Image: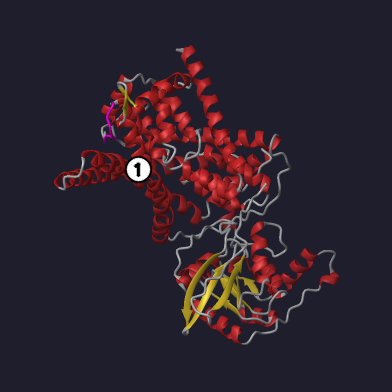
Amino acid sequence: MAMNAVDTGLVIRKRHETDKIIALGGSPNVGKSTVFNELCGSHQHTGNWAGKTVTSAQGYFEYHQNGYVCVDLPGCYSLMAHSAEEEVARDFICSDKADAVIIVCDATCLERCMSLVLQTLEITSKVVVCVNLMDEAAKKKIEINLGLLSKRLGVPVIGTAARSRDGLDRLMEAVHKIILSPENPTIRIPYSEFDDIASAVVSTSEDICDGAVTYEDKNYWKKESKIDQILTGKWTAFPIMFLALMGIFWLTITGANYPSQWLSTFLFWIEDQLTDFFHWMKVPGILTGMLIHGVYRVLAWVVSVMLPPMAIFFPLFTLLEDVGVLPRIAFNMDKCFKKCSACGKQALTMCMGFGCNAAGVVGCRIIDSPRERLIAILTNNFVPCNGRFPTLITIISMFFIGTAAGAGKTILSAGIMTLFIVLSIAITFLTSKLLSKTVLKGIPSSFTLELPPYRKPQIGRVVVRSIFDRTLFVLGRAVSVAAPAGLIIWLMANIVIGDKTVLLHCSDFLDPFGRLLGMDGVILLAFILGFPANEIVIPIMIMTYMAEGSILDIGNLTVLRQLFIDNGWTWITAISVMLFSMMHWPCSTTCLTIKKETQSVKWTLLSVLIPTATGMLICSLFAAVAKAIV
């Protein structure tokens, strides 16, 4: 299995020959990426779970008229390489490419972070220890004697609160000095006194922190422990997870409704102006149809349908991450994945898939075992991404809760949506189990999952970075593949063979097979043509049913519902479409991402076959049973 999950051949991009290279290391969840962002002004994403940063990022900044290239290494707990992240960090530090190494530690649990500091000091003396989250330590009444720690280690120890930039100037001053004149560490690990290396490192870490770290309130952790008892409790964990998921969907559905309508109205108004302009310029009708009614109209649909819910969903999702809730969800689901002989970290990649399956596939890099990483990649598509939500929400609104607005309607819609999501998670468990017992046999590996402290979220920063780093990034990829798709769809809808368009010929050919799945040929064709972007599935159905040569804007769900009913839709059709929407082939972007991550055509094809075969099986069984009952 070729699993090039982590970039190992890092090319340093200097601006000037005199630029210095700084390696930024640290355990997961210590604010390392925040330090990187504040130093470099980068938009590198910061996450509140272990293993979030899995590749090496670079940034550039100047200090005292000197240029610095900062390399943000993957977070790891040790340099005794056990995972891909640890290998990357170890190899770069050992390569001696860095002029200085900053090891970021968490001030609220300094003893745990000290192991990485000691191992780094055994490799290089050009080390500065950054004790971050000093503000969090102060709130918990933890006092740290930085001078004593520096004396015991023999290297500079600087306290910082990176989110407010406190201490970063002192940090860079220490880095500047140690590059000019490296110090000799005074600490040595007495390996001979212990049975193994880990015991020696842990014992030495305890000795270093003894007396240098004092706790005024030794019960500071009890409050968080009580919250954890609720969020990870035997009887409360899963109901809370269900309600949290339902709450996110409710806010997304409620908040995205009106902005989506406004955006649609605005974009289709622009279309009218472009059409008038093309007519004024005497552009040939076929070119106007291809560019305006084909390419532009599909793009307008994708943007108006996809942008508002993403702009709400991603910040909400990131807030849960920033507060520290998502690691608890992973903790709760760990046992479920262990029973499937998979990795508990798959819960995190599955959560990422709600926003974008391609992002979820990339997130599978945090899983150490190649076997378990493949299981997570092959099953990630069972979680419906943000691009499939509009189809699910539209069908729920039309066939199950009515088309009227109101808080009760949106709550019921979110509840039904959540039930379908729970079903998709159950299918993920089942498929992971089958894979682990067949083509990907093996014993589940162990991993360290840290439950980070609860933190007050930085709402402004979360919103801005969610929009720029996630929403616009995903939207840009969707737009790039939707544009050529719009051209192809327009051509199929306007090229006539005999008495029918190519689009209708294709739908008629697929109709018998679509009926077996509880749908029809038009629906199946819409899913096929929606391969570049799931957002255009419903618009293609509308266009084909109305026998129009271009996608139409039907904003009234009552009219849309009647159109579907007139073309043979029933509640069986509606549920079959929802089931197939959750379980069919990945979109083009996700397929390309899978190919890049696995470096294998075989696993890419299997990632397409597994959800498609599962969706067809479930839809055909449901349709047969439902029709027999009715």
Can residue 294 be seen at all in this image of the molecule? yes
Between 163 and 58, the one nearer to me in the picture:
58
Q: In this view, does 437 lie to the left or right of 384?
A: right
Q: Helix or strand or loop: what does disc 1 sit on?
A: helix
Position of 612 compared to 520: left or right?
right
Residue in view at x 57 percent, y 78 percent: 158
Residue 258, quarter of picture: top left
Q: How many badges with numbers are in the image?
A: 1
For residue 417, above or below residue 156? above
Instruction: Pinpoint residue 544: horizontal percent, then vertical percent.
Output: 32, 28
Q: Kindly identify which residue carries mark 1.
A: 302
Q: Nearer the viewer, residue 290 or 61?
A: 290
Residue 594 in the image: state x and y as whole percent: 55, 46
Is disc 1 surrounded by few (<14), some (14 to 19) or many (20+) residues within 10 Å? many
Main SS, magenta residues:
loop
Q: Position of residue 577 (x, y in %)?
A: 43, 28
The vertical placement of 592 against 35, above or below, is above
Question: On screen, 257 above or below 45?
Answer: above
Q: Give the range drawn in magenta.
A: 547-553
**Colouring mode (rainbow / by chain / secondary structure / one colour):** secondary structure
The image quarter in which residue 205 lies? bottom right
Three-letter code, disc 1: Val
- Asked if residue 329 shows in the view, the reply is no
Q: Which of 427 and 332 is in front in this view?
A: 427
**Could you tell me which residue is drawn at 67 percent across and 48 percent down?**
370
How far across and down, in percent of the image, does residue 581 sit?
Answer: 45, 33
